[in-house]
Amino acid sequence: MSKAVRVRFAPSPTGPLHIGGVRTALFNYLFAKKHNGVFYLRIEDTDQNRFVPGAEQYIFEALDWLGIAPSETVGKNEKFGPYRQSERKDLYKQYADQLINSGWAYYAFDTSEALDFHRKQHEEQGKTFIYNWHNREKLDTSLVISAAETEKRIASGEAYVVRFKTPVDQTLHLHDIIRGDISFETNLLDDKVLFKSDGMPTYHLANIVDDHLMETSHVIRGEEWLPSMPLHSLLYKAFGWEAPEFAHLPLILKPIGNGKLSKRDGDKLGFPVFPLEWKSEEGVSSGYRENGFFPEAVINFLALLGWNDGTDQELFSLEELVEKFDLNRVHKAGAKFDPDKNKWFNHQYLQKQSDESLAELFKKDLLNRSTSTALSVTDVKLIRIVSLIKERANFVSEFWELSNFFFEAPTSYDEKAAKNWKEDTPRTMQELISVLENISDFTSATIETDVKDWMTQNEIGMGKVMQPFRLSLVGALKGPHLFDIVELIGKEETIKRLQTAISTL
């Protein structure tokens, strides 16, 4: 690579950061770290009409939570600051003027009413109105009025825009790292607005100027920006600057049906599309963090949406992703979002956590519950409970459902399972109580040995004891190893639950 790698994530603070934007940030981060480069974040807030309070802070907090914070951004190592475009607006007019003076741009004074008239006129003829080479000298532009008249109209405060003067009859041969060689016919391009009379640039001008001044080496962004590639390449040529290399990432697609993944898909199918919870006047949108996902699982899942390392490996640490990441292995086709696979990743990362750390997370959940029994459980016992149930869980939030019988006696019994409670079951359970009362070393292994010895000596079948025994303690035929449950709830509680079942069932 000829020059130092500097890549950027440049979101607009118009709402919560979509998971597609997070993946763009991640791929930029991985590429930068792989090449010992810099990953920086620029806030593109030139469109003040769409600015949403709190959105900028949300972006920073989300990337911090995911462990992919930028090296340079607003208030942090501002080597090429400011890193907010709204604070750089004084820069852009000189570049718009430069394009005017070099003949690469022109002033356009068309009113919105005039443009609407032209659009409707074209629609009536079954055509699409495009503002470009074929009509720009017939419209209200500095290409057809004198320089003196142009200056007079600007000085009088008349509204105008600066439009790019797209070359005529050229074929642009461009290269995208992911998509290869691409050609564009300039006659099919429109003359985009670059600058407005209110002193604010449009995305296209600000983006190019900032990427150049911030020494961006590679522009890694979503596929939706691919149609802007010819304009951006021409702008670099117009300024006489070396263009960065481009890489356009595939879309993240809906789990069901066609099209790009949206918030509506998440609402409909019950999964988050934002990294963190977002509150607005429209309501609360759930986030991965609040849904109990581990950030490492989210990163791993997103990395494999549109990229793989060429092997069957699915679980990667962030360090492994950095080591193996290669833009040449990013797919061109869109990547379908799979909510179930997302949960699978979280399950894998949950199993990687220590029982102690999971117990701490579970304890926070227990504090929100009113049961005093749950709150009185010792840390040692809680760690043991976690070790017994975690294999069945995708999220810590599922621990209570998987373990509530450790903390509370069942208040009802599963009807289907209760069919195992036969006429002679109460007598068998009463005998079992006598066996349990005589066990002094009340540990899982000893209890299991003594109970099974009693069953063997009395020729009692396994099903006659184990299913009613579990039903009495749990309220259903579920849960980890039965004798581990017995040890953890203790002799007194075990006998009490058996007696309740005898009198109830």
Image (cartoon, grey):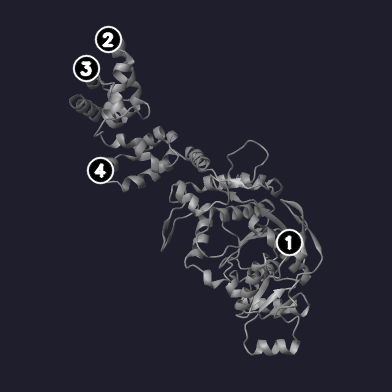
In percent of width and height, residue 315 lies at: 58, 39
Would residue 296 be visible to someone looking at this image?
yes
Determine which quarter of the picture holds residue 279: bottom left
* Disc 2 target residue: 458
Front one among 154 and 457: 154
Q: Label 3, label 2: how many angstroms apart (C-alpha)?
A: 18 Å
Q: How many marks?
A: 4
Dot placed on the residue nearer the N-terminal end, 4 or 1 = 1
Residue name at image x 20 percent, y 17 percent: 427
Q: At label 2, which amino acid type do we have? A: Asn
Position of residue 10 in the picture relative to residue 359 (left or right): right
Q: Are marks 4 and 3 in contact (CB under 8 Å)?
A: no
Which label number is shown at residue 244?
1
Picture layout, residue 441 above or below residue 43: above
Which of marks 4 and 2 precedes in the sequence? 4
Q: Which residue is mark 3?
A: 423
Percent from the top left, x then y, of residue 402?
36, 36
Q: Secondary structure at mark 3?
A: loop
**Dot 4 and dot 1 residues touching (CB under 8 Å):** no
Instruction: Return the disc, 4 or 3, that comes first in the chain's sequence.
Output: 4
